[in-house]
Each structure stands twice: as structure tokens, then as C-alpha cells.
Image (cartoon, helix red, strand yellow):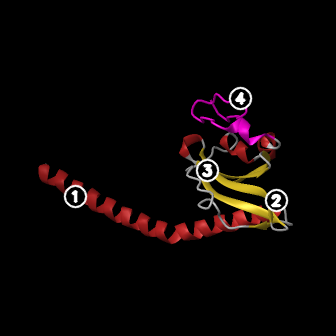
Amino acid sequence: MKKKALKYGLFLCVLGLIVGVLLSVVNAITKPIIEKQEEEKVTTMLKEYNENLTWSGDIKEELNSSDSNILAIYAGNLNNEKVVYAYKVVGLGYGNGEINSMVYIEDGVIKSVSVVSSNGQTKGVGSQVEEASYLNKYNGAKVSSYAGINPQSHTNKNADVISGA
């Protein structure tokens, strides 16, 4: 009996090791492809926001931003003058799925919010974050009204939370 259990245990360990290696290989192959597609989507979104602007590359390090929720910062220039900043941000959705968004800010005012990706969101509930009716609520809001939001406490009245509960 012990021999049989040891045999099955060893089999499961080897099988787990093989599956783990295969998943690592698939991840190594697909990760750069997915990152490139998302980068292309961001580039398209920046152009769609205002086709007259010239966009910088990511300037997050230049601005010494250490906020882990800010993935990248782009500056939109018109006649060599910065007129808008686009922040690529990440937040957790329901079930720990990430929501990557672009937030366009001019003179301390949110001009537009758009979703880059919202993987793992429940259709009809969490997927509402991609709808214009939800995103447009932030247009025209002062950035200072969102300063210090704790997404876990939901105490800031300016931030709406979507929930299926």
C-alpha cells in the first residue's frame, strides 16, 4: 500500500514539474507578444486622444514617480509645449483581475479616461468599467479630488465602485 502511494505521489510530482516547465515556456513565448500588442494599443490611444499632439516616450523615471499603480507617463506636446499628460495606470478589479487605464490630465483636470485592458472582469458587472457611461463620469474632475483615495476603504465620494454584491 505504501509503495503504491509513493509511486502515485512521485508520478504527480513529475507531472507537476512537466506542466510547470511547459507553462513557463508558453509564458516566455507569449509575454513579449502580449506586451507589444498592449504597447501598440497605447500608441493608438494616444494618437486618437489628439492627433495634433506629439507624444513623448515614457517619462515616469524623469518625473521620479515611484507610485507602483502608475505604469507609464506620456507627455503630449503642441509646438514644443507640454499641454497634456497621459498616465497609464493599473488597479485591481474584482477577483484580482487587473484593469489598465489611460488617464489624460490637462492643467490638473481629468480630460478623459479610457481602458487599455480589463482582463478577468465579470461580463455585465466588472466589464462596466469599459463603458463610456462609467468612464465619462471622471471627465472634468479635478485631480486633487482623487488625491489620497484608498481603494480598499471606498470612503472618497468622488470614486465610484462597481460591485456585483
Question: Mostly what secondary structure, the magenta segment?
Answer: loop
Mark 2–mark 1 distance (CA, rounded to whole Å): 56 Å
Q: Secondary structure at mark 1?
A: helix
Residue 138 on the magenta segment: no
Q: Residues within 10 Å of mark 1 (few under 14, many from 20)?
A: few
Q: Which span is picked out in magenta?
A: 141-165
Nearest the camera: 56 or 44? 56
Q: Tags 4 and 1 in contact by the CB under 8 Å rule?
A: no
Nearest the camera: 27 or 19? 27
Mark 2–mark 3 distance (CA, rounded to whole Å): 19 Å
Mark 1–mark 3 distance (CA, rounded to whole Å): 41 Å
Mark 4: which amino acid?
A: Lys
> Which disc is residue 64 wearing?
none
Q: Which residue is tagged 1?
A: 10
Mark with earlier residue (4, 2): 2
Left or right of 151, for residue 79: right
Q: Residues within 10 Å of mark 2 (few under 14, many from 20)?
A: some
Residue 156 on the magenta segment: yes
Q: Which residue is tagged 4?
A: 157
Mark with earlier residue (2, 3): 2
Q: Which residue is tagged 3?
A: 90
Q: In percent of the image, x 17 and y 54: which residue is there?
A: 6
Q: Which residue is tagged 2?
A: 49
The label nearer to you, 2 versus 1, is 2
Mark 2: which amino acid?
A: Tyr
Where 126 sits versus 56, above or below?
A: above
- The quarter of the picture where the C terminus appears is top right
Q: Position of residue 99 (x, y in %)?
A: 63, 49
Mark with earlier residue (1, 3): 1
Q: Tags 1 and 3 in contact by the CB under 8 Å rule?
A: no
